[in-house]
Image (spheres, rainbow, N blue to C red):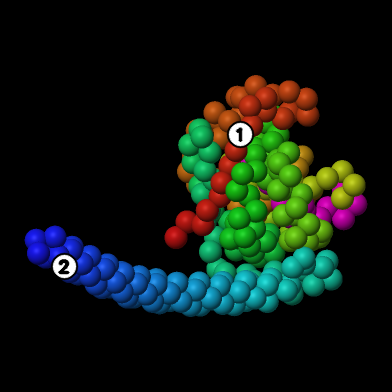
Amino acid sequence: MKTSLSIVYLFLILLFASCEDKESSSKNKSETTSENNVSGTKTSKLDSLKAKYAKKEEIALQNEEEADERFPIPQEQLIPFLTQYGKENPENKVRIITSFGNIEVMLYRDTPLHRANFIMLVKKGYFNSTFFHRVAPGFVIQGGNSDNLATPRKRSEIGDYLIPSEFDAGHKHTYGAFSAAKYSEQNVSKASSPFEFFIVMDENGTPHLNNDHTVFGRVTKGMEVAEKIAQVKTGQSEWPIDNVEIDIEIID
C-alpha cells in the first residue's frame, strides 16, 4: 500500500513540474515575442529617421550644387559675375589668422572687382590652409598659395581667370598696402592673379610697383605681425623653410 501511494505521489509531482515548464516556456516565448516587437518598432523608427535625414542631406547637396553652377567662372563672365557678387556681398574687412598673430585688412570699395573676388574666395574657404609662401624682408610678404594638393583643386573648381587691373582708383604701394599678385606672363595685360596677394613691407613704399599691380586694400591692424613673418628663414624662391599657414575670415 505504501509503495502504491509513493508511486502516486511521484506521478503527481512529475505532472505538476511538467505543467510549470510549459507555462514558463509559454511566458518566455510571449516575452520574447513582445521584445522583438519593441525592437522591431525601434529599428523601424531609426530607419525612418535615417531616411528622413538622408533626404535632407541630398536636398542640401542639390541646393549647393545649384548655387555653384556659376563655377568655375569663365573669363567672359567674370566682370558681370563679380559686379553682381559685390552688390550681394558688401563686406570689406577681413582678418588673416596666423600662428604669429592676426593681420586685419580693409578692402577698398573703389576697386570693386578685386574686393568682390577676395570676399568670394574668403567665403568659399579658399585661403584656409594656404601659406605666406613668399617672404622678402624689406619688400613684401606674399600669400594665397601652398604645396597642398587641395590648393590647385580649389583653383580649378573656382575658375582659371584673371582680374582686370583697377589702376584708376589711384592707390599706391605704400607701407602696409594690400595688393594683387600677378605672374610675369601676365605683364602685357597687367591683370591680377585672383588667388594671391601681397603686403608691402618697405617703409618707404615700393613706387615701382604702382600701375603694375592693383592695390585694393591696406593693413589696418597687425603690421607688427607682418614684420615677424617677414623675418622667418626662407629657402629657394623665398619660400619659408617652416610654412606660415593662414586662415582668413570676414570681420563683422
Query: Can residue 100 be found in the magenta stretch?
Result: no
- Comes first in the chain, label 2 or label 1: 2
Q: Position of residue 167 (x, y in %)?
A: 74, 57
Residue 158 sits above or below residue 146 on the image:
below
Q: Nearer the viewer, residue 5 or 40?
A: 5
Residue lying at 79% horizontally and 47% vertically, measured from the top left: 182
What secondary structure is marked by label 1?
Answer: loop
Q: Which residues are magenta?
A: 187-201
Label 2 neighbourhood size at 10 Å, few (<14), some (14-19), many (20+)? few
Picture quarter containing residue 130? top right
* Cα–Cα span, label 2 and label 1: 96 Å
Drawn side of residue 31 relative to residue 239, left or right: left
Identify the residue under disc 1.
244
Q: Amino acid at mark 2?
A: Val
Q: Nearer the viewer, residue 232 or 29?
A: 29
Residue 200 visible, this orientation: no
What secondary structure is marked by label 2?
Answer: helix
Q: Amino acid at mark 1?
A: Val
Q: Which mark is residue 144?
A: none
Identify the residue under disc 2.
8
Residue 108 sits above or below residue 222 on the image:
below
- Please count the marks in the image: 2
Main secondary-structure element of the magenta-colored stretch: loop
